[in-house]
Image: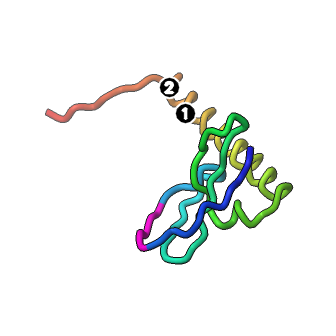
Amino acid sequence: MEVREEGQAGLVCTWQPCALCGAPFGMFGEDRVYVAYDEEGGPIGRICPACSGSGEEGLAERLRRRAGRLRREAGWLEGLAEEGVRFRVEA
């Protein structure tokens, strides 16, 4: 993965989740825009200031933490699906 600086946010104000850590962040004005790319050069998405400023080791740790959160959430969702889904319709 490669992180590239791609200029400034400009006049548009955007709120979005970081493509790497998932944290919501905003960009506007003179904020620097950082985008992560996969090994084939395909864009992964914009990343937050915390990820772009954490360095290689720090970013790797942030990715590991998010992966752990996603595994826990996936397990929880699978558990809900295994319990079965019931709809209650009020008459």
**Residue at the location (36% across, 26% down)?**
86
Location of residue 84 by image quarter:
top left
Residue in front for this viewpoint, 3 or 65: 3
- Residue shown at 62% from the left, 39% from the top: 42
Taking the spot 54% from the left edge, 77% from the top edge, the residue there is 30
Q: Going by the picture, which residue comes out furthest to the left?
A: 91
Q: Quadrant of the N terminus?
A: top right
Query: Helix or strand or loop: what does disc 1 sit on?
Result: helix
Q: Is residue 61 left or right of residue 30?
A: right
Q: What number is the disc on residue 81? A: 2
Is residue 9 inside the magenta stretch? Answer: no
Quadrant in which the C terminus is drawn: top left
- Magenta part, dominant SS: strand
Q: Amino acid at mark 1?
A: Leu
Q: Which residue is mark 1?
A: 77
Q: Which residues lie in the magenta part? A: 11-15
